[in-house]
Amino acid sequence: METGRKADLVLLDMRTVNFTPLNDVRNHLVYCENGASVEKVMVNGQIVVDDGRCTLVDEDALLAEIRGFAPDLLARHAEVERLNAAFTPHFEAIYRRCNGQSLGINRYAGHESDWLTTATS
């Protein structure tokens, strides 16, 4: 490392639920951390996240703008769901047919007769 170079750095609060109980930090980062532990981020020497908040974008304004799109999005989604309802009986038939096929394995607890009766009825 050289003095005067710009840095990229992420500081995490390791007291959060994502790091509790702390075992292998690498595993926690890959499998548990969802961003909730991020305290500060520096990119190219500039702080872009401070106290878990983005410094370059007004997140509250951005979220408000996105929420403004919700009514139109929900209306369009409702129409798609209405059109897709025509396929429901066909998918249910496919599901029942597939569910009735034995795979030759039992990954369920209990007796096979119990879950087969439930799955095919």
Image (spheres, rainbow, N blue to C red):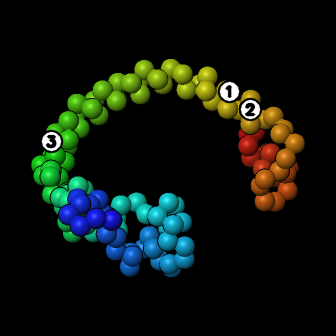
Q: Do the residues labelled 2 and 3 touch (CB within 8 Å)?
A: no
Q: Name the residue under label 1.
A: 94
Q: Which of marks 3 and 1 is nearer the N terminus?
A: 3
Using the image as rendered, state which of residue 60 and residue 109 is in the foreground.
60
The correct choice, above or below, for 104 with respect to 73 in the image is: below
Query: How packed is label 3: few (under 14 Cα within 10 Å), some, or many (20 or more)?
Result: few
Total marks shown come to 3
Q: Do the residues labelled 2 and 1 touch (CB within 8 Å)?
A: yes
Secondary element at tag 3:
helix
Q: Residue at x 50, y 60 (%)?
A: 30
In the displayed image of the protein, which residue is found farthest to the front? 2
Quarter of the image where one finds residue 35: bottom left
Give coordinates of residue 52: x percent, y percent. Answer: 24, 65
Q: Residue at x 27, y 69 (%)?
A: 39
Q: Mark 2 points at which residue?
A: 98
Quarter of the image where one finds residue 9: bottom left
Measure the C-alpha gap from mark 2 to mark 1: 6 Å
Label 3 is placed on what type of residue? Glu
Measure the C-alpha gap from mark 3 to mark 1: 41 Å
Using the image as rendered, state which of residue 53 and residue 70 is in the foreground.
53
The circle drawn on residue 65 is 3
The correct choice, above or below, for 68 with respect to 32 in the image is: above
Label 2 is placed on what type of residue? Cys
Camera-side mark, 2 or 3: 3
Secondary element at tag 2:
helix
Q: Which residue is drawn at 34% across and 30% down?
A: 77
Using the image as rendered, state which of residue 31 and residue 45 is in the foreground.
45
> In the rendered image, is residue 52 in sight?
no
